[in-house]
Amino acid sequence: MKYLSDTKISEKKVLLRCDFNVPVKDGKIIDDSKIVKSLDTINYLLNNENTVIILSHFGRVKSEDDKKNNSLKVVYEELKKYIDLEFIQNPLDLSVIKSSSKKCFLVENTRFTDVPEKKESANDLELAKYWASFADIFVIDAFASLHRAHTSTSGLSNYLPTYLGFLIERELTNLESLINIQERPFLVIMGGAKVDDKIGIMKSLLQKCDKLVITGGILNTFLKVKGHNIGNSLVSNDEAVLNDVKEILSNYQDKILYSDKFVVARGNGVKEVKLEEIEDTDIIYDNIVDLPNLINDYKLVFLNGTCGKYEDNVFAKGTKNLFEHLKKSHTKVYIGGGDSASAVINLKYDQDFEYISSGGGATLEYVAYGKLKALEYIKNIQKD
Ligand code: 3PG
């Protein structure tokens, strides 16, 4: 694999794949860290007289209607504060690049090409060929998208010399400590809402770590399978997932930890309760992980996901508590991206940990399996 840092690219046309899939609330970006972290590569390319055509996906696009809420325009407005660029409205028509005097372009959401027929997500090579026809070089810097082998993350490498950007290089270097574990005991903390998305990865991480704390919404399904009352809380009903949960509970009972303190919505109010006090109509929105002594016993911690609905102040106690314990510990703490990174930033713990990754699913897959689909694809195509 070739790195941008090992080469000098100047006066070229560069297709640059970033991950600008940032969280937005009420039309405002609530965590701009993916944008800020991409600026190193963008500025390097622009300072070396290259023309830069930026591609990114944004949200999930499955229908014509989804396009209304998933335009990259909101990112364009933010990016304009840092660089002079033009927005290209149609990812299937980049012809404006040839007549524009601008040096930098942001192309509308690559996933718009998935409707009516999947192109980007199907790694359509005709589309790759079309996009590649506007450039001499492909630089990929979208670490958070590397678990997807799509046209803009992989297919392009069939047609253009490909380099990994500065953001990806930093991620791979920093996450190395979680791939080849040199420091033990190693604790994994997994939270977040949906157990279905994380169960496979949890199985793999259980083989690597010394203990695993389950928290957040994903804990509900484990509690239900164990026969506890969890009221009306979010739970998985997927047969395969339930079987995996059972298997984990029986094979790894010595490795798994969780806290039995919760904050639930009850009637019109909010109540802190122990597991056995949960009533039929309660909804669990927060799990209070009180593990100060436990965390101090570990040399290395990987955290992915939050303890609850931290965006709502009444349900932020568990996540804040956990961050506070981690901050005070003498442990090296790595934060997986996505929601956990946004929580760390929004609750103002961003200076307190060893490393905060920009990837959500990508970081999880990399830490669990040591591989990322797009990187494997590119490695195969760009053999030298
Ligand atoms: C992310 O935010 O984790 C990445 O941008 C990937 O998004 P996706 O899960 O929609 O592919």
Image: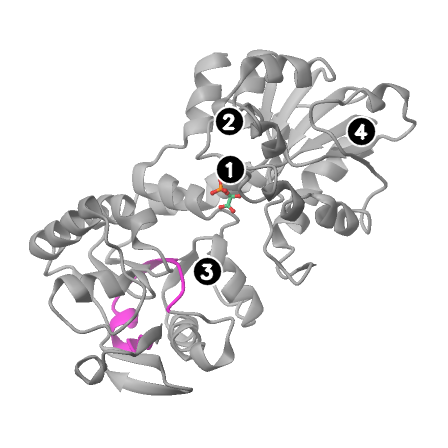
Residue 351 in which image quadrant:
bottom right
Label 3 vs 1, first from the N-terminus: 1
Q: CA distance from mark 2 to mark 3?
A: 25 Å
Cβ–Cβ below 8 Å for labels 2 and 1?
Answer: yes
Residue identified by numbered label 2: 150
Crowding at dot 1, Cα within 10 Å, few <14 / some 14-19 / many 20+, comes out as many
Q: Is residue 288 magenta?
A: yes
* Residue 359 rendering spot, x and y as whole percentages: 49, 46
Please tell me whether mark 2 or mark 1 is closer to you in this view: 2
Q: CA distance from mark 4 to mark 3?
A: 35 Å
Q: Which residues are magenta?
A: 287-307
Q: CA distance from mark 2 to mark 1?
A: 9 Å
Please tell me whether mark 4 or mark 2 is closer to you in this view: 2
Residue type at tag 1: Ser
Q: CA distance from mark 3 to mark 1?
A: 17 Å
Left or right of 358: which side holds 193?
left
Label 2 vs 1, first from the N-terminus: 1
* Residue 246 rendering spot, x and y as whole percentages: 12, 53
Label 4 vs 3, first from the N-terminus: 4
Residue identified by numbered label 4: 48
Give the number of the disc on residue 91: none
Give the SS element for disc 2: loop
Left or right of 355: which side holds 29?
right
Residue type at tag 3: Ser
Instruction: Say whether mark 3 is within 8 Å of ligand 1.
Output: no
